[in-house]
Amino acid sequence: MKPLTHEELFSLEQYARVRQDFRAKVLAHKKNRIVALGPNATLHFEDRLTMQYQVQEMLRLERIFEPELIQEELDVYNPLIPDGSNWKATLMLEFPDEAERRARLTQLIGIEKAVWVQVADFARITPIANEDLEREAPGKTASVHFLRFELMPEMRQAVMAGAAIRAGIDHPHYQAETTLTQATRDSLASDLAHGDSGSEQRM
């Protein structure tokens, strides 16, 4: 998928007009791109549409309209858009109780490297995690990690041919696995099919 550009973004005024409908579209799109891994971990697979939403919301929140500051936001979020040979996802660890969250994040150091996806009977793919970012504090892991799963050509071909996809976590203190639903599998296949999947043009 191509990076987002200024020209594809709504201006602040335009976004104020379309935000309700755009947000509804994005939330419906996201439903097929969220994979629960056990009770406390979720993978949110990103694409151009989810990243445009993040950028638009940041511009709205911060009232940003200067071109150089808009580019700074694009530079932050564009690396999270898959490029046709990979999947990119945000791993979120969620523990509602604060005391439990502190204890579990201490236990779960390295969990981002223990996540995996598997296409059909190919070998599991573990991610490249948190590129150029430090996501661990002394003695604990972060609750949010950014992952890139690189697929070999034969894996991509299998996905395009309809192969099943599984995902999981294999960590000493957290284990889970699941088979992706057909809707989620098809949405991820679209990331590999063409570069414009999930994009939204400016009105």
Image (cartoon, helix red, strand yellow):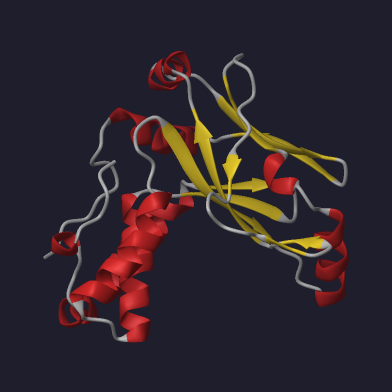
x and y percent of residue 2 in the render?
Answer: 25, 44
Residue at image position (83%, 69%) is 102
Q: Residue 8 or 188: which is nearer the viewer? A: 8
> Can residue 18 be seen at all in this image of the molecule?
no
Residue 65: image quadrant is bottom left
Q: Residue at x 35, y 54 (%)?
A: 78
Up/down of 85 relative to 104, above or below: above
Please report the residue visible at 81 percent of the width from the left and 68 percent of the height from the top.
101
- Can residue 189 be seen here? The reply is yes
Q: Where residue 183 sits in the image (x, y, percent)? A: 45, 37
142 and 35: which is toward the camera: 142
> From the image, which quarter does the C terminus lie in?
bottom left
User: Residue extending furthest bottom?
Assistant: 63
Please report the residue visible at 63 percent of the width from the left and 33 percent of the height from the top: 126
Residue 103 vertical position relative to residue 78 in the rendered view, above or below: below
66 horizontally vs 49: left or right: left
Whether residue 11 sits left or right of residue 100 in the image: it is left
Indicate the quadrant containing the N terminus: top left, top right, bottom left or bottom right: top left
Q: Would residue 187 be found to the left or right of residue 15 on screen?
A: right
How many numbered marks are there? Answer: 0
**Residue 139 place in picture, x, y as percent:** 84, 63
On screen, residue 48 above or below 85: below
Between 107 and 158, the one nearer to me in the picture: 107
Residue 158 occupies which quadrant of the picture? Answer: top left
Horizontal and vertical percent for residue 64? 28, 82
